[in-house]
Amino acid sequence: MPSSIAELHDREVLAILGQVTEDLQASAAAPSAPIADDQEARAALAAFLRTTGVIEDATPNAIVADDIAATELSREVLTVLLEDEASSALATEAVQSPPADDQMSIELAMAGAVVLGALITWLQTKVHIKVKREAGETSFEFELLKDATDKDTIKNVASTVAKMI
């Protein structure tokens, strides 16, 4: 086993993120995402950053803009998953026992989708995302899952997301 995330190959990191995302969705830590696709995931993350005031001019196109950026970002996302209470055990297990190379069907060209899925799933361990689709428009509402009166918590989550993007 590699002694650090930096020693993992890009494909290993993406495979680990995919595994942790599936495990989080299967556990009570994060419900299935109401997000339809990558474009909606980018829009949700941008809306979250704007709503919290962390990045007031966040646009979907700037969120995980391409697969090269996503590959680099994947290590940051994995670090957050390893350090977060809701995902630490699952992430640690996946890093200690990464999928075998023959199980790594993740290609680097899909890095953006994997990173977006991991970010949305992790975000759902902190906030409930409500998606509204009306008249061809999509909008989002966010509710803090724990300590609903603590506005600083949601701002801290948004700041963490902003640092990773």
Image (cartoon, helix red, strand yellow):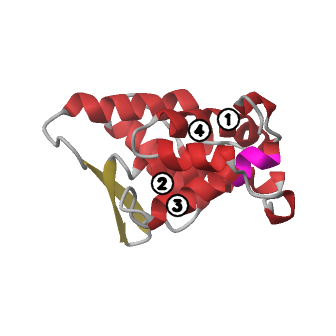
Residue 54, percent from left and from top: 39, 28
Question: Of tags 1 and 3, which is closer to the observer?
Answer: 3
Question: Which amino acid type corresponds to the residue marked 4 in the rendered image?
Answer: Val
Element on which disc 1 rests: helix
For the N terminus, the quadrant is: top right
Say above or below: 20 vs 31: above
Question: Which amino acid type corresponds to the residue marked 1 in the rendered image?
Answer: Arg
Q: Is residue 52 magenta?
A: no
Which residue is disc 4 drawn over? 77
Which residue is disc 2 drawn over? 121
**Residue 72 vs residue 46: left or right?**
right
Question: Which amino acid type corresponds to the residue marked 3 in the rendered image?
Answer: Asp
* First in residue order: circle 4 vs circle 3: 3
Q: Which residues are magenta?
A: 11-15
* First in residue order: circle 1 vs circle 3: 3
Residue at the extreme left of the image, as rendered:
149
Tag 1–tag 3 contact (CB < 8 Å)? no
**Residue 144 vs residue 78: left or right?**
left
Element on which disc 4 rests: helix
Tag 1–tag 4 contact (CB < 8 Å)? yes
Q: Which mark is residue 23?
A: 3
